[in-house]
């Protein structure tokens, strides 16, 4: 089931001329509807579509250059995961990676992406979820792109104290998280990353932030699953990004049997028009190869 939205189009001021944005709310699970924005160029340069899943609490403005570049070239579905404030959650919901990954499967089925006719791209949390569902999708993408994927989410054991934290203390806790991240987990030379992280954390729903942090704390990638993913895959790293474990990103790349690797150096560069062009060139190449294979 899909619900249309009447949200203002001014939030898409980064779109290139003649591109369009359509907002849907897709029932991705019981009691959970996710906002999915379909960006369409005036004339698509390619015959396929792309489903893009950004990272944990990631907000769209940090992707404006990336989306601007791709929205001029192909139909793109931008899916906001269930921990984001745009999600419509009626009652209780779980926020483990299994639940987030299952949402992506259901959204792909909702849009009836044809087998071998779409690219599946994820960043950070979105990339890790893509790994988990790559072999579960009834209709397979012709390639996948993993941007800064996680093998785990580096949550400290002390995070369990969030379970007992009353609502009135969530905002101070959020400010503490912001200080820790900016001080220790964000490259001080990447000012745009710091700015976008603070904005995303400020906008994040405090309750869902708490529940998703607890839901993700025990996740560990099963390295054996990577060998079974034979879909062509591009892994994107950023050597100077200290928020994501670059050693694990390289390990993910080496465990995938049909993968290529690109390094974009900084977190901000992974959200840039250059990153978009690298992704676009890769998926176009893999689509052509998929059609040339008898």
Image: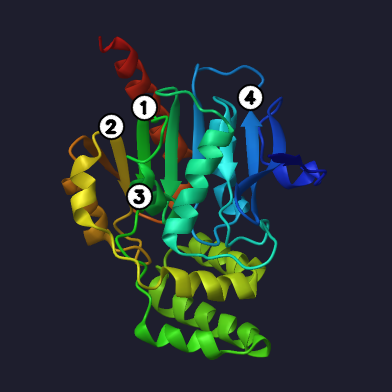
The residue singled out by tag 1 in the image is 142
Q: Residue 141 location in percent, x, y?
A: 40, 30
Marks 1 and 3 sit apart, C-alpha to C-alpha, by 16 Å
Task: Evaluate if marks 2 and 4 touch, with contact meaning CB atoms under 8 Å apart.
Answer: no
Residue located 42% across and 29% down the image = 139
User: Quick one: label 3 or label 2, which is nearer the N terminus?
Assistant: 3
Q: Is residue 34 left or right of residue 114?
A: right
1 or 3: tag closer to the N-terminus: 3
Pick the front one: 62 or 149: 149
Query: What SS does tag 3 mark?
Result: helix
Marks 4 and 3, the one that precedes in the sequence: 4
* In-image side of 293 versus 185 (left or right): left
Marks 2 and 1: CB-CB under 8 Å? yes
**Label 2 crowding class (10 Å Cα cut-off): few <14, some 14-19, many 20+?**
many
Q: Are marks 3 and 2 in contact (CB under 8 Å)?
A: no
Residue bearing the label numbered 3: 132
């Amino acid at each position: 089931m899909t619900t249309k939205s009447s949200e203002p189009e001014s939030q898409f001021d980064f779109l290139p001329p003649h591109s369009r944005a359509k907002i849907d709310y897709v029932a991705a699970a019981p009691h959970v509807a996710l906002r999915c924005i379909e960006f369409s160029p005036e004339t698509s340069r390619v015959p396929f579509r792309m489903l893009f899943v950004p990272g944990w609490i990631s907000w769209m403005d940090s992707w404006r250059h990336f989306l601007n570049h791709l929205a001029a070239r192909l139909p793109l579905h931008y899916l906001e995961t269930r921990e984001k404030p745009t999600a419509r959650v009626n009652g209780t919901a779980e926020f483990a990676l299994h639940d987030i990954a299952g949402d992506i499967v259901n959204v792909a089925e909702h849009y009836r992406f044809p087998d071998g006719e779409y690219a599946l791209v994820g960043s950070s949390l979105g990339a890790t979820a893509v790994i988990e569902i790559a072999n579960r999708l009834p209709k397979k993408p012709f390639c996948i792109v993993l941007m800064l994927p996680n093998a785990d989410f580096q949550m400290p054991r002390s995070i369990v104290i969030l379970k007992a934290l009353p609502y009135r203390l969530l905002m101070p806790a959020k400010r503490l998280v912001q200080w820790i991240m900016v001080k220790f987990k964000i490259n001080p030379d990447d000012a745009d990353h710091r700015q976008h992280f603070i904005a995303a954390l400020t906008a994040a729903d405090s309750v869902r932030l708490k529940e998703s942090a607890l839901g993700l704390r025990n996740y560990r990638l099963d390295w054996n699953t990577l060998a079974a993913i034979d879909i062509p895959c591009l892994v994107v790293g950023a050597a100077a990004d200290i928020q994501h474990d670059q050693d694990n990103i390289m390990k993910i790349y080496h465990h995938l049997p049909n993968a290529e690797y690109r390094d974009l150096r900084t977190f901000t560069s992974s959200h840039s028009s250059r990153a978009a062009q690298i992704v676009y060139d890769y998926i176009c190449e893999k689509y052509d190869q998929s059609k040339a294979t008898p």
